[in-house]
Amino acid sequence: MSDSCAVAHGGAGGGGGERTLVVVFAGAVGEYLLRYGADLGYRTVLVEPERGRVSDTSAHEVRTAVPRDLAGGADVVVTDHHRAELGPVVRDALAAAGARVGVMGNPSHPAPHVEALRGLGVPESDIARVRRPIGLNIGSRTPPEIAIATLAGLVAERTGRPGGFDFATPAAVDSRATRGVTS
């Protein structure tokens, strides 16, 4: 049996070493990210500057600021681009050595983190490191779907895969369906 078959049958671990998922800002999407991230083997950290917003969480650790000591390969996901703390939190995440930083948001809308970071004097080269949107474009709408799409994108990036199927438009999906093509 191949290694990938053994993993699918529960006979071998996925490996990959210690990975950290930092979810910035408490909320429904963040909680699903933490829960599913733990299932994927991440050490999960919730960063919520306002402690009163944290009631019950599945995070391994809760902090009020982004940890500076993130191990290389940490994924930082900012779940709310409307918060006043957006600029400082993203700036601090960018300063963490080796962290990959993403901010959720619709790519057809302006990215508020850009102006917030410019206002803090963050260099354009650092601003360009922020991924937005993040995750796979699967048409997710609910908090669990958004979390799944986000984590799938992180896994695809970590493994060097493009992620998903190359459906250019919804019409392409409809075209494949009418030809009897299934995924």
Image: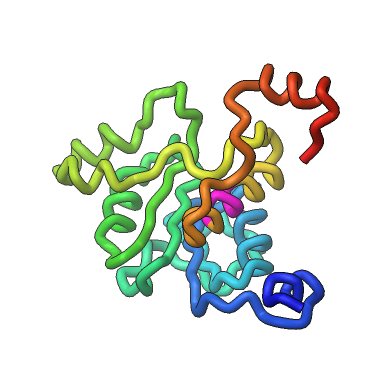
Question: What residue is at 85 percent from the left and 28 percent from the top?
Answer: 180
Judge by depth and name the residue closer to the eye, 144 or 47: 144
Could you tell whether 153 is left or right of 56 in the image?
A: left
Residue 174 drawn above or below residue 41: above
Judge by depth and name the residue closer to the eye, 45 or 100: 100
Judge by depth and name the residue closer to the eye, 82 or 78: 78
Question: What residue is at 38 percent from the left and 24 percent from the top?
Answer: 110
The picture places residue 175, in percent across and down from the top left corner, at 74, 20
Could you tell whether 37 is left or right of 181 in the image?
A: left
Bounds of the magenta segment: 150-154
Q: Is residue 137 magenta?
A: no
Residue 181 drawn above or below residue 72: above
Residue 135 drawn above or below residue 52: above
Question: What residue is at 69 percent from the left and 43 percent from the top?
Answer: 145
Number of marks in picture = 0
State how the image is colored.
rainbow
Residue 80 drawn above or below residue 46: above
Question: Which quarter of the rendering shows the N terminus?
Answer: bottom right
Could you tell whether 85 is left or right of 170 in the image?
A: left
The picture places residue 31, in percent across and down from the top left corner, at 64, 55
| Chief SS of the magenta region | helix
Question: What residue is at 60 percent from the left and 52 percent from the top?
Answer: 152
The picture places residue 45, in percent across and down from the top left corner, at 51, 67
The picture places residue 21, in percent across and down from the top left corner, at 50, 64
Judge by depth and name the residue closer to the eye, 48 or 81: 81
Question: Which quarter of the rendering shows the C terminus?
Answer: top right
